[in-house]
Amino acid sequence: MVVQLTVQILIASIIGGIMGIVSHMKKRGRLEKPRMTKRFIYLGFYEDFAVGTIAAIMLVLSSEPQTSFQLVLLSIIAGYSGEAVLRSFEISSDPEKPDLPSSKN
């Protein structure tokens, strides 16, 4: 059981990372390398690779795919739309927050 889960996580991370790079190239039109500015370090395609990998792992762990087709499909979807998948986990994991009163002028 543990070995199967480890293999699923490994496959999801590889596919999610590759799809993260594909998403990066679609958004930016090219593969941007990491660079440093005076105040910021831009990770380039490494950032989208990491986001795709993390999103694919989280989606696979939360959905527990039963077949290899489901595993590959979930990894592709999560890797390609990585930021949206991570945002959905953030929203669903927050406890019920009270609504703030609206200010009417």
Image (cartoon, helix red, strand yellow):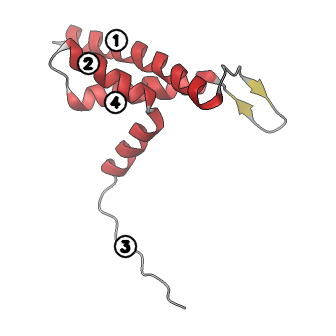
The N terminus sits in image quarter: top left
Left or right placement of residue 46 versus residue 58 in this view? right
Q: Cα distance, mark 3 to mark 2?
A: 37 Å
**Residue under circle 4?**
58
Q: Residue at x 27, y 27 (%)?
A: 61
User: How many other residues sit within 10 Å of disc 1, few (<14), some (14-19) or many (≥20)?
Assistant: many
Q: Are the residues at dot 3 and dot 1 in contact (C-beta closer than 8 Å)?
A: no
**Residue under circle 3?**
99
Q: Cα distance, mark 3 to mark 1?
A: 41 Å
Specify the amino acid type for callout 3. Asp
Residue 4 appears at what percent x and percent y? 21, 10
Specify the amino acid type for callout 1. Ile
**Sequence-wise, which precedes: disc 1 or disc 4?**
1
Q: Which mark is residue 71?
A: 2
Residue 100 appears at what percent x and percent y? 42, 75
User: How many other residues sit within 10 Å of disc 4, few (<14), some (14-19) or many (≥20)?
Assistant: some
Residue 19 appears at what percent x and percent y? 46, 20
Q: Secondary structure at mark 3?
A: loop
> Closer to the camera: disc 2 or disc 1?
2
